[in-house]
Amino acid sequence: MRKLTYSLMLFVLAILVAPAMAQSGQERAANLRAQLTDLQAQQADLQSRLAQLDEDINTENIERSLAGIGSTHPEDLREARRRQLEIQRKGIQSQLDTLATTRAHLEAAIAAADAQGYRETVGPNLSGDTTSIPRSTKAIVNRSSRQKHRLKRRRLHKR
């Protein structure tokens, strides 16, 4: 039974990962940008909720929210409400922190996908060189550096 479960999970994983691997760099970058847009919308919603909670935590607003509730110990009710709001605030803040790290990872992935897309559009580098200077320009650069070296040697021998 466990083998069947593991093989089924492996199969599902392969089905999910294979299309992602087959995507071009540009498609992958577009998908990542869409995810980044969704993430930014989530961040904006959470930040507005955090601002609202910060406003609700004020003592005047806590007293106003509990004005219609009668109790022999209103200070306990206010303290319970403040704790509840603080817990919500910490939860939202941790979600925002998680979204911030996810956003950084997404931005790095977008940059990598853009670079991959650029490499795909440029095509393979058949010469095996890792630089982006064309061969003709390299020859000119090498020739000019050789000429400078010769001139230096001539100047040294003339002295």
Image (cartoon, rainbow, N blue to C red):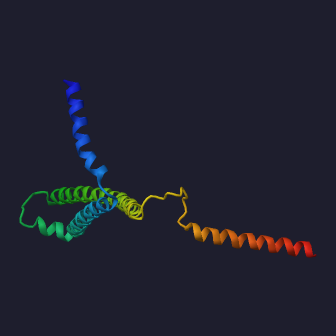
Q: How many discs mark residues in the rendered view?
A: 0
Picture coordinates of residue 6, whole percent (x, y): 24, 30
Residue placed at 63% from the left, 68% from the top?
139
Picture coordinates of residue 20, whole percent (x, y): 28, 51
Pick out the residue farthest to the right. 159
Work out whether 148 lies above or below 94. Answer: below
Residue 109, quarter of the rendered image: bottom left
Viewer-nearest residue: 70 or 83: 83
Work out whether 2 lies above or below 36. Answer: above
Work out whether 149 lies above or below 10. Answer: below
Q: Is residue 24 left or right of residue 122?
A: left
Rendered-image quadrant of the C terminus: bottom right
Residue placed at 23% from the left, 37% from the top?
11
Viewer-nearest residue: 35 or 21: 21
Picture coordinates of residue 138, whole percent (x, y): 61, 68
Pick out the residue farthest to the top. 1
Q: Is residue 100 left or right of residue 67?
A: right
Viewer-nearest residue: 97 or 51: 97
Rendered-image quadrant of the N terminus: top left
